[in-house]
Every structure is written in C-alpha cells, then in structure tokens.
Image (cartoon, rainbow, N blue to C red):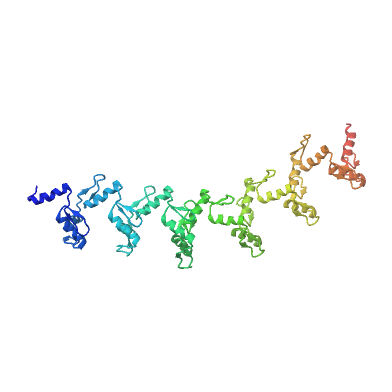
Amino acid sequence: MFTQLGHLKTHGTIHTGVKNYTCLICGKAFTRLGHLKQHENTHTGVKNYDCQICGKAFTQLGALKRHGNTHTGVKNYACQICGKAFTHRSNLKRHGNTHTGVKNYACLICGKAFTRLGNLKEHENTHTGVKNYECQICGKAFTQLDVLKIHGNTHTGVKNYACQICGKAFTQLRDLRRHENTHTGVKNYACQICGKAFTQLGALKRHGNTHTGVKNYACQICGKAFSWLCDLKSHGNTHTGVKNYECQICGKAFIQLSNLKTHENTHTGVKNYACQICGKAFTHRSNLKRHGNTHTGVKNYGCQICGKSFTQLGNLKEHEYTHTGVKNYACQICGKAFTQLGNLKEHGNTHTGVKNYACQICGKAFTQLGNLEEHGNTHTGVKNYACQICGKAFTQLRDLRRHENTHTGVRNYACQVCGKAFAWLGNLKEHGNIHTGFKNYGCQICGKVFARLGDLKRHGNAHTGVKNYACQVCGKSFTQLGNLKEHGNTHTGVKNYGCQICGKAFIQLSNLKRHGNTHTGL
C-alpha cells in the first residue's frame, strides 16, 4: 500500500519494465528519478552518503546500507544452492555464476573470462603491471587482493591448505595444487625446447635457465653461480659442512637433497639414468656421464707418471695405486688386498663361485674378466706370453709363469702325502689322484680311465695311431713319451728296472714284468 498515488505509479513501472529516467551521460535508464540522481553521482564522483562507523562514503544510499552489513555482520542474501550468505545482493548474484559457470566479464586483452567484475579488474592489473595491494609488513605489492591475503600467511605462518594424501600443509592454495601433482604424477608444465615436463610452473621456469645459461643465483663466498635457488642453498652447505639430508636406511648424511635421493637408489636398486647408446642403466647421473666417454672414446684423465689416459676419474685414481703400491681394497673373507675395486669384486667371485664372464664361442664361464680374455686366445691361437729364456709362447699368463719354473727348477707345490713337488698346481692336483685312487679322465673310445689328463691324452694316441715321439738315434716313433724314454735306454744301456727278488735289471718295464713271471710260475 502506498500513501501517495504518485508512489504507486512509480512502483508500477517495476512490473511493466518501463524506465522513464535516462542518464544523459551514459544512456542508462531507471524506473525511478531518485535512482537516476544517485547514478549521476557515479559520473560526478559526489559521495553524499557517509558511513557513521568507518567514515567511508558512497554515491548511492543503497550502497551505504549494504556496506553497513559489513560492520553488523548481517548477511541477508543467501544462495539457494549451497546456502552461502552475503551482505550484498550483488555479491550473491556474482556468486551464482560459480554454480552456473557463466562468466560475463571477459578481458579485452587476452580474452580470459570471469564470473565477477572485480576479478576482471584485478586480472587487468596483470597486463598493466599495476600492483594496488601492498603488504603492510614487508611492502611487497600484488595485482590481486586475494594474492595479498594469501601472502600474509607467509608472515603469520598460518597454513590453511593441507594435502589430503600426506597431510603436508601450505600457506597458499596454488602451492597445494602443485604439490598434489607430486602424488598424481601429473606434469602440466612442459618445456617448449626439450619437452621435459614438470609438476610445478616454478620448476619449469628454473629449468628454462638450463637452456639459456642464465644463472641468477651466485654464492657470496666463492662466486659460483646457479640457475636454481635451491641449488645455491644446497651449495652453501659445502662451505658450512652441514649435512641436513640423512638416509633413513643406513644413516649416511648428505649436503644436498639430490645426493640423498640418488643414494637411496643404491638401496632400492632403481637405475633411472640409462645410456641412449647401449641401454646400460645407472643409479647416478654422474656415472652415466662418465660412462658416455666409453662410447665417444674421450679420455680426459691422464696419469702424471706413465701418461696412460682414462675415461673416468675413478679409474685414474685406482690406476695410480699401481704406481704407489697402495692396496685399499681388501677381501673380507681371505684378507687379500687389491689396488682396484674392480679386481676386488672379481676376486669375490672366487669365494661365491659366481661366474659372470662366459665365452661366446664355447660357453665356458669364468669368475674374472681377465681370465675370459686370456681364454679367448685358446680359440684364436694368439700367444701373447713368451718365455724370455727359451722363447716358448703361451695363450695365458699363468701358463707362462708355471713354465718358467721348469727353467728355475722351483717347485712350489708339494704333495702332503709323499712330499713330491711340482712346478704346476694342476700337476699336484692330478698327482693326488694317485694316492686317492680317483681316476677322473675316461677314454671315450674304450672306457679306460686315468688319474691324470696327460695319461689320457697319451693313451688316445693308441687309438689314433699318432706317434708324436720319435727317437733321435734311430728314428723309431712312439705314441707315448714314456715309451720313447724307455726305448732310449736300449741305446744307452741304462737298466732302471730291477727285480726285487733276484736283483736282475732290465732296460724296459715290460721286460721286468715278464721276468717276474719266472718267479711266480705264471
């Protein structure tokens, strides 16, 4: 009900939609004259309506009334969908767009649209660079109010944004969102140069410096510069000696987090760094880089004593021990020490029986790479090891060493049963079969077995008819060396075989055996 007819007529325009009052400046029309007059103040800047509490002035009475709710806390405008309440009707309308998805406010520069006009205006500051929102504590300025509010948490320490997976909390929502990608594995930020993707935008920006070569973070102590701030911080520990990153498995501590993560791979066995050429994988990136030299042939590390060069620094250091005689690598089982770690590892196989080095030709496996390489000479016929005394050559070094004993007369391998000594360990082992009665070497033709391999080989000539042993006096040939030696006695007259009963001596063992029958009556 209205007390005046004019008021009723004016009210009626609300239902009819008739707007008789038009602004002469912008053309906007209103149903009431009072609304037009208040609107004109937005052009003139006149603010006739002051808040009695805070003194803030407004161009319209309605704006003042709605502002009053910010002091009283009254929120008369509630969302019918989610129930959220607002002090201003306009705020409720804009909030409604968050449910409908309508974005009526579009940026004229980049086209990005927003549900609220205020958000659009703040966004425009990102193009103009205007930062109207300044932190009262540190003075840092921002283009958006929300960003300033979130920044305030860095001073108060308040972390309102917690990860639902691991519980880690953050002062800013965007930090939480980026952190969540570390759980999902989503990498939304890809490098336009190399294609490498990252879970966080900041990581992508810092990565960009690896392409441009820009290093904005310099150490104040030594001047070394880095493209990443975190790398500079970690580097600082190299001066202080602080090791903040400790392995939860073995307790070893590291100066840099990246070193700890790489170290953890030694426990898990994960090898993330694979060679693009041969596919060999490594737990450390640095190991992969050094390995690359094995393909390129680059040898940057030269020995100052003999000039020998190496592709890896570690190999050079181990090589230097061959000059100093230092043996830092000792076997925990037998105590034998080595100048190189690789030699120790291979030596360990002699205890475990592991044979990792197999011949590609015959399949025979070895515990040490050097043994495999020497074995390869048995197939190629190459004899790299020559005796300095007689010139006889061998395919394997150990064979040369044993052969040299035949010249020096040294016999280091003595039988524990009869005391007979041998120059070769293999000969001692075969000799032992004489005492044990073991005959491990069987003839594939007749089945006869022998205690020694040499005996089997000589016996084989009896089947093949090969006579490799010729008498230098008469030229007669024999299949076995022992037979040749006995035959030699026929020329010298030496009689080594004496009868234990009557003392009669013979040149050959076979003659002695036949003579024995004269005593036994056989």
Vertical relation: 243 (above or below) 475: below
How many numbered marks, from 0 up? 0
Residue 484 in the figure: left or right of residue 47: right
| Closest to the observer, 450 or 130 | 130
Residue 134 in sight here = no
Vertical relation: 460 (above or below) 86: above
Q: Of all residues shown, which one is farthest toward the left?
A: 3
| Closest to the observer, 114 or 132 | 114
| Closest to the observer, 481 or 175 | 175
Query: Residue 166's spot in the image, x, y percent?
Result: 39, 49
Query: Residue 33's spot in the image, x, y percent?
Result: 14, 55
Say which quarter of the image contains residue 68: bottom left
Say which quarter of the image contains residue 439: top right
Residue 214 in the figure: left or right of residue 26: right
Quadrant that contains the C terminus: top right
Residue 508 in the figure: left or right of residue 214: right
Query: Residue 341's spot in the image, x, y percent?
Result: 61, 55
Q: Give the residue drawn at x 18%, y 48%.
A: 17
Residue 308 in sight here = yes
Query: Residue 262's spot in the image, x, y percent?
Result: 50, 54
Q: Give the residue drawn at x 32%, y 65%.
A: 139
